[in-house]
Image (spheres, helix red, strand yellow):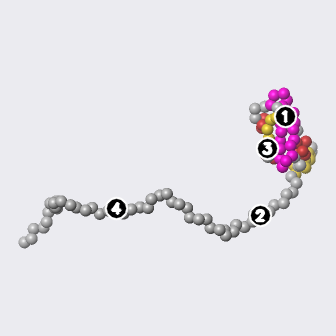
């Protein structure tokens, strides 16, 4: 769960370091760190509060309520294409028409018979 809220997470010796929006939280996970980051279990409340989240546990429902501070959302500026890009150089050669054959030498006999006139 913490990895989904973090920008970066890594081991620094025996400490797990989680960073988001310039805030870093460190916790000692033991003398030997685990192989995978998602296999470490830590108390979520102090970590989330350190990242700037609002955390409340409701024991009657067994729920952990996490609220992220509101952030301003702005739409992107519209795209204005004032400068058109220059045409690209094409490396494919232009197709050339096949030249017609030029016969030289003696003519060859016909292969198809001609109709016999009456």
Q: Any mark on residue 79, and which?
A: none
Residue topped by disc 3: 8
- Label 2 neighbour load within 10 Å: few <14, some 14-19, many 20+: few
Q: Position of residue 14 (x, y in %)?
A: 84, 31
- Mark 2 and mark 3 in contact (Cβ < 8 Å)? no
Image-based side of 114 in relation to 43, left or right: left
Q: Secondary structure at mark 2?
A: loop
Location of residue 93 in the rendering, given as x and y in whole percent from the top left corner: 45, 59
**Which mark is nearer the camera, 4 or 1?**
4
Residue 41 placement, left or right of 93: right
Q: Residue furthest bottom?
A: 118
In front of the other: 43 or 94: 94
Magenta region, residue range: 14-33
Q: Residue 75 bears which disc, if any?
A: 2
Mark 3 or mark 4: which comes first in sequence?
3
Q: Is residue 96 above or below residue 33?
A: below
Q: Which residue is mark 4?
A: 98
Q: Which residue is mark 1?
A: 15
Badge 1 marks a residue whose secondary structure is strand
Is 2 above or below relative to 28?
A: below
Label located before the other in sequence (3 or 2): 3
Q: Is residue 42 magenta?
A: no
State the CA–CA distance, disc 2 to disc 1: 39 Å
Q: Secondary structure at mark 4?
A: loop
Considering only vertical position in the picture, is 81 above or below 41?
A: below
Residue 12: image quadrant is top right
- Of all residues, the one furthest to the top in this rendering is 31
């Amino acid at each position: 769960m913490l990895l989904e809220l973090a920008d970066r997470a890594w081991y620094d010796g025996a400490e797990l370091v989680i960073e988001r929006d310039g805030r870093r939280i460190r916790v000692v996970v033991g003398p030997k760190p685990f192989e995978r980051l998602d296999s470490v279990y830590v108390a979520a409340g102090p970590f989330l509060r350190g990242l700037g989240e609002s955390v409340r546990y409701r024991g009657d429902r067994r729920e952990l309520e996490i609220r992220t501070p509101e952030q301003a959302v702005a739409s992107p500026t519209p795209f204005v294409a004032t400068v058109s890009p220059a045409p690209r150089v094409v490396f494919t050669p232009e197709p050339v028409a096949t030249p017609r054959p030029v016969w030289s030498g003696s003519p060859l006999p016909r292969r198809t018979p001609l109709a016999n006139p009456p």
